[in-house]
Amino acid sequence: MFIQGSNEMKKQLILGVLLILLTMPVKASAQEEISTGSNAYVTIEKYSGDGEQPVNPTDPNEIVKPGPNTDGTNPHQPSTKGPLSLNYISNLKFGKQTANGNDAVYQVKPDRVIDSKEAEIDVPNYVQVTDHRGTNSGWTLLVKQDGAFKNGVHSLAGTELVFTSPVLVSKSGKDTTSPSANANFTLTADGNSAMVMYAATDQGMGTWVDRFGKDLEEAKTGIQLKIPGDSKKVAGFYQTSLTWTLTDTPFTE
């Protein structure tokens, strides 16, 4: 009986000790943290490409090509080179018009480009500028008319090219860095330059399009040719040229 009792007491003692141990709070060991460092590197090189490709003026993330030149007019000029470039400028076409002795206003025809699916589409006339300089220092775009509309020795006196309804869009879609567009300007044969677009410091980076008209309907009146009634109009094909000048001079008020 004594041995049996001793074993029973030992069992109870062991169980008691285990119960105490199980109910005691366990102190967590301190978590060890080790820190070290690393580095990140990038090299920015000056842009030295041949200029950006033309984009769709209503969807600037789509690359396009100039449309076919089937009417015998001069083809589009290629993009200028370098980090600050003029990539595309629409040729302005006013079609065939009947001579008359009244003041006349003629609407521009839409530009035609080839989209990414190789389809010919009509788009508003536009100009495209790209700034890849990385300096965020602004720029200015000017245009002038290089003399009167001429047909051999004949010319149209007193004409006006009127530009309105500018719409600015970009590949980045960041309106906060948008340049500004001149709301309306007029070109005449006297060769005076007009402001088209301008970017102040920290504006106009990347590719920007200035299209004349929010859609094809508005684009009909976005650029107009005005010919006064007293201008002599000998039948024939008349043309003039425009000079567009992009400078790295930022616009200031």
Image (cartoon, rainbow, N blue to C red):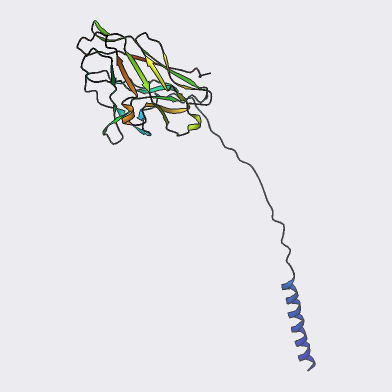
Name the residue: 37% across, 14% down. 187
Q: Is residue 7 left or right of residue 144?
A: right
Q: Position of residue 156 (x, y in %)?
A: 27, 9
* Displayed quadrant of residue 56: top left
Name the residue: 72% across, 60% down. 29
> Which one is in front, 178 or 96?
96
Q: Is residue 96 above or below residue 213?
A: above
> Which one is in front, 73 or 135?
73
Name the residue: 40% across, 10% down. 192
> Which one is in front, 35 or 70?
70
Q: Position of residue 63 (x, y in %)?
A: 35, 32
Q: Position of residue 35 (x, y in %)?
A: 66, 46
Q: Is residue 112 above or below residue 97?
A: below
Name the residue: 24% across, 23% down. 69
Q: Please count the marks in the image.
A: 0
Q: Position of residue 250 (x, y in %)?
A: 51, 19
Quarter of the image that includes the N terminus: bottom right
Residue that extends furthest to the top in the rendered view of this protein:
153
Residue that extends furthest to the front in the rendered view of this protein:
102
Residue that extends furthest to the bottom in the rendered view of this protein:
1
Q: Is residue 97 left or right of residue 14?
A: left
